[in-house]
Amino acid sequence: MGASSVPLAWYLILGSALFCIGVYGVLATRNLVVIIMSIELMLNAVVLDLVAFARFIEPARVTGKAFGIILYATAAAEAALGLALVISIWRTENTVEVEEIDVLKG
Amino acid sequence: MPIGQIAFLGFAVVSVIAALRVVTSRRVFHAALWLIVAFFGVAAVYMLLESPFMAAIQIFLYIGGVAVLTVIAIMVTKGVMREDRRILNRPVAAGVVSLALFVTMTWMIIQLPLPEEPVFPVVEGSLSLLGAALVDPKGYLLPFEVVSVMLLAVLVVSLYLGKER
């Protein structure tokens, strides 16, 4: 079986690479839509780690995937809500750059 | 080198390069398209993990839902035709922070005694076990229901926020 020749650590390193790229995107970009995309990338990296753990160290291979599915629903909700917020901010402020959005500043 | 490792490295390189393009490409629309490539790479890695169901969800939910929603949001907010050069916000500091995080996590992963092979043998009918566990009161029924209520609430709030006023 080809898949069994890949160690667990490789999957975890791939997950951490994707997560850190997402962290960079959140920290370094000013566009709200790109920040939401980076958060999706980070969530996807977490689910990748969960599925890898489910395959390698779990007898029934269920727990990791169950949490992964619940995380998927959370990620979809986060994306829908975040993009609705972006569109709402675009309507009132006419910008999606985080530094120009200061309506809540005292 | 076994074929599985070569396939894994190929998919990993594709997803990491696509993810890097997501956070660095000049146009937001291109970033959204690279995001789709990155999600496809992760779906292929799920296939290597013998989880075809997760790969299918990844494609349906992430690419069919999240990525398409993102593309629509970009179209609504900026207009695809407009050239918007993205200005980065403190790219050096952000790069140092995320690189330090990556090095730390990789060092920790290498230190851990992780298995090279799956510890337990393959279970037949893993997908029906997963479905049963999700609706089992002794399993994951509570988070499942909480997440469905949360999805409904988010749907209502998104409709409210997106409405023209």
Image (spheres, rainbow, N blue to C red):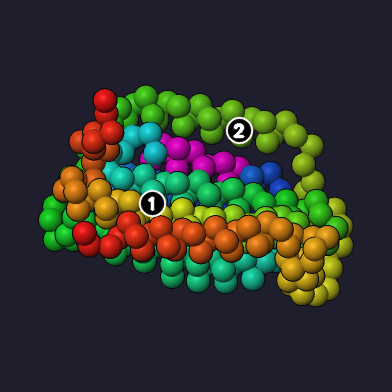
Q: Position of residue B129 (x, y in %)?
A: 79, 70
Range of the magenta residues?
A13-25
Residue A17 is inside the magenta segment: yes
Q: Residue at x 41, y 46 (%)?
A: A38
Name above or below for residue B40 compared with residue B25. below
**Does residue B53 appear to the left or right of B11 in the view shown?**
right
Q: CA distance from mark 1 to mark 2?
A: 28 Å
Q: Residue at x 57, y 61 (%)?
A: B149
Query: Tag 2, which chain?
Result: B
Farthest residue to the front: give it.
B165
Q: Is residue A65 visible?
A: no
Q: Residue at x 59, y 28 (%)?
A: B104
List the residue tagged with mark 1.
A82
Name above or below for residue B132 compared with residue B26. below
Q: Position of residue B131 (x, y in %)?
A: 73, 71
Q: B67 or B104: nearer the eye? A: B67
Q: Amino acid at mark 2?
A: Met
SS under mark 1: helix
Q: Position of residue B144 (x, y in %)?
A: 66, 61
Q: Is residue A81 visible?
A: yes
List the residue tagged with mark 2.
B105
Q: Quadrant of the C terminus of chain B?
A: bottom left
Residue A102 is inside the magenta segment: no
Q: B164 or A20: nearer the eye? A: B164
Q: Position of residue A98 (x, y in %)?
A: 27, 38
Query: Tag 1, which chain?
Result: A
Q: Residue at x 38, y 29 (%)?
A: B94
Label 1 crowd bin: few (<14), some (14–19), many (20+), radius 10 Å: many
Q: Quadrant of the N terminus of chain B?
A: bottom right
Q: Amino acid at mark 1?
A: Gly
Answer yes or no: are tags 1 and 2 on the same subunit. no
Label 2 crowd bin: few (<14), some (14–19), many (20+), radius 10 Å: some
